[in-house]
Image (spheres, helix red, strand yellow):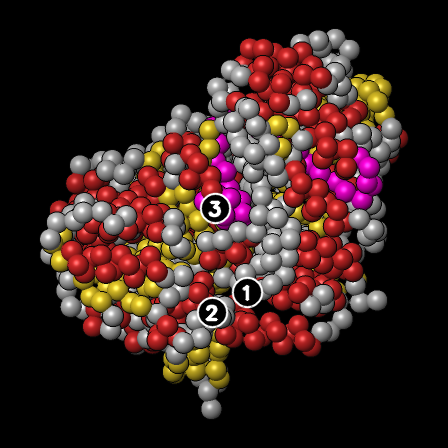
Amino acid sequence: MAEYLIKNGFVYDPVLGIKGDRTDVAVKDGKMVETSALSNPAEIDASGMTVMAGAVDIHAHVAGPKVCVGRNFRPEDKLFRATPQAGIKRMEGGFSVPTVLRTGYDYARMGFGFVMEAAMPPLYARHVHEEIRDTPIIDEGALPVFGNNWFVLEYLKNKEIENTASYIAWLMRMTRGYGVKVVNPGGTEAWGWGLNCPTVNDPVPYFDVTPAQIVRGLIEANEYLGLPHCMHVHSNSLGEPGNYTVTLDTLKQAEGIAPRNEFGREQVLHHTHLQFHSYGGESYASKSFESKSKEVAEYVNSQDNITFDLGVVTLDETTTMTADGPFEHHLTELNHLKWVNTDVELETAAGVVPYIYSPKTFIAGAQWAIGIELGLFSKDPMRTFITTDHPNAGPFIRYPRVYKWLMSKAAREDMLDNVLKYGDSVRDRCYIGEIDREITLFELAQMTRAGPAKALGLANMFGSLKPGMEGDVAVYPYNPETSEDPEDIERAFSNARYLIKGGEIVVKDGQVVSNGNKRTFWVDCKVNENPQVERDIAEKFKRYYSVNLANYEVYAHHYVPNPYVIEVDATQ
Amino acid sequence: MAKLVTDVVCPFCGTLCDDLEVGVSDDGTKILEVYNACAIGAEKFLHSQAKDRVTRPRMKQEDGSWKEISYDEAVEYTATTLAAARKPLMYGWSSTNCEAQAIGTEIGEMVGAVMDNTATVCHGTTLIAVQDVGVPSCTLGEILNRADRIVFWGCNPAHAHPRHMSRYSIFPRGFFTGKGAKGRKMVVVDPRVTDTAKTADIHLQVEQGRDYELLTALRVAFKGEWLPDTVAGIPKKTIYEVADIMKSGRFGIIFFGMGVTQSLSKNHNIDQAICVTRDLNEYTKWNIMPMRGHYNVTGSGEVWGWLHGFPFALDLSRGFARYNPGDTTSNDLLVRDEVDAVFVIGSDPGAHFPNSSVKKIWDLPSICIDPHLTPTTAVCKLHVPVAFVGVETGGCAYRMDNVPIECRKVVDPPEGMLTDLEFLERVTARVRELKGA
């Protein structure tokens, strides 16, 4: 395989502690190596440019049934946004819910090497994997949802952690899943009857278990198994004014639980798109609504076993999609736009509604501010990751814009003064105007590379340029010594000059030149035989599922043609 | 003593039953019996065993006779025809697996084809309505476990989806539905007294073509507002009564079929039906689901959705994906003479399209990939028989509720026959050569 020497760039690597030194980086046979290991490398001149490891996205909705609904029911999302076929690059289409082809190409152009699909309904796992298969270049994994699964609800009502863990291991194998995702614990099952669980103490109808019990139980089961990633939660009452107390109650479920795994992961709970969960006040009106980002961030700062991602609102017209069924119904009542809902037997639900975050409204401006504030209040960039909960708060192609807002106070002031219609109200009701902090490039590398890689249990592969890591290197046309205009940040990080992915050059001079050799990551967790769980599975499939047990597993080669399996032994 | 293959998926209708058992001869070559399937499904399996089955491609000759040719020649004709065409129509895709659909789409990209599936004459109107107002829905297991109100509107599952009522919707006992059919209220809306209508608690014999009026009347009735004495032939008392039944359920569903999608008002009917469902969610939990016909028509919409963002009427002829039903739909293209070659796979437009369209297929260079002899194979220039998906090869198919299920291979195809996927892979390779891509 090819050898590459990336010369003279400003290198940022949190794992190696390199903070912008001009140094050379070497790739050989798909891995990072010492420069001395190269014999006859192709040289890439990165002088005047920024060099980082390939980025890692911990949470985006990029593949699967609800994403495909978003594409199919929004032809308007593709209007005037098509890009023709060119060379090896296939046709691209879509904006907030791009086609899988554009998804792969856009991530590559932004210098990403790994993306985690954030919610996989187990019954639809095949669909998720087919889309992942057809997404070029980037490595991906998918998190099956567990927070409203009948097996989990029944086991956790009786505090049966071991049974829950056995079931998780089984389901991850059936679905080729990566970890434990929880969305509106209990609330989505209640949505089966058109109801919800707004706080952590509301019992789930019939199942009589509370969201707090579900969250804590799943953390314990996750650590019982020692999975690479921790329990990944979207807590109850997303998007509701005053919901920050529910968020704090959810985060507190992790207190006293220590991580137990062999992947170097140090946290037990990941809270996703925290922006949507850090609201105060009683309504969306500017008289009442307020930011509680400081309160939530302070709690996170005080704990060392929690990570989170931001979910920054990017002020675009987008397509919201979540396994939080009741929330999407709430949203369609609010904005009266088209609404898709799919309840999935015994497992979960999902909803999809288009949404316009208009800078002309107070509330969109306040949401924007809260996401940015969380990133700036957080004291540990290794536990704080940049996302837009793609496509919920905005499409992932806006990440570079979010970087700009985090890295430049001037850019934020410009938003408040010139873009947001109610910038003054936003200053008044949120903290954004008081914060002077500007994220550095080193911190950016922590928040987009080393941090998420570590939280996913992939620190031995991604997030750094250390010899032995995957050969994922991004070179951005950004000169940290001379660039002064914040727009340079957005421009440079939107289109890497080069991306080497798995040792192969896929972006060259800013153009996609290869469809790469993508892999699907999943976790195969070995557990002791558990006759009770086996019996329960057989019984539920016989009586309540609409598919036979033998037809549930994603077994055929064409779903996961290029797997990377992480094995975990939880038999001890 | 025969071998029994279990958990077999039925490749006939959108119900995609996955509990079939097929008895196979000891040497694994012959299908002897099919258990658990409906009459149509069983026939699909048994039909693959027909002695007079065509097992090699055939090219139509000048004199109208057919000449057997090799698969190599068939690949060559297909690839050169598609590559030479300015704007070929690649239609069908509903009775094949998703892998074939995905690779077929790559061919479509290379040759600048218009891709369309059977939704174009079936539930395409539903897809348009969903683009207007969305769709609150669920999986079929949710109906099994929760539903106590079932409405069949313009569909006749007793004949078209024969196991639907017994597997999912009316008779089974689920988790919260221990009483089975006794715990469910069944309403059928149909101008005909169908066998489905005969089993209903209430049959609304709507005037033909007046579904839109009845749907809007229900929306009025939910709010308790004024209605005229009769709407669409139904007395207002009955409408209020049915509205009450719908509102008082804990979990309801409307299943609908081509009686509403392809009758007067088309997609506007479905808009209203979806709005009825939306309205009901103000009071309780309601869902709506199209009764998709072909076993994998849903899958073709999903494959095109993730590759290009549109579920049917996908026009790739300009080098990027475009969608404009009425313009990029098969029949409109055919009758306007806008396509210069026709490729059909996994469908039978010869039987389903208007005669004016079928004549155009007859006039054009045309290829039909189909295991059966059909009216379409009769009008095309080249007929390529292939293995039956779900009988002689596996692959992914999407049920009417979008749940993907992996079909099973039960027996080998007759010796030397290719699958859809194998044939298309060879065509792809040849087209790539021809296009120099």
Q: Residue furthest bottom?
A: B1
Q: Are marks 2 and 3 in contact (CB under 8 Å)?
A: no
Mark 1 to mark 3 CA distance (whole Å): 23 Å
Which chain is indicated by disc 1?
Answer: A
As shown in the figure, which amino acid type bears the numbered disc 2? Phe
Mark 1 to mark 2 CA distance (whole Å): 10 Å
Read off the residue under disc 2. Answer: B176
Q: Are marks 1 and 2 in contact (CB under 8 Å)?
A: yes
As shown in the figure, which amino acid type bears the numbered disc 3? Gly
Q: Residues within 10 Å of mark 1 (few under 14, many from 20)?
A: few
Where's residue A490, x and y in %?
Answer: 63, 19
Read off the residue under disc 1. Answer: A206
Location of residue B267 with respect to B316 vertically, above or below: below
Q: Earlier in the sequence, mark 1 or mark 3?
A: 1
Does residue A19 appear in this view?
yes
Where's residue A256, x and y in %?
Answer: 83, 51
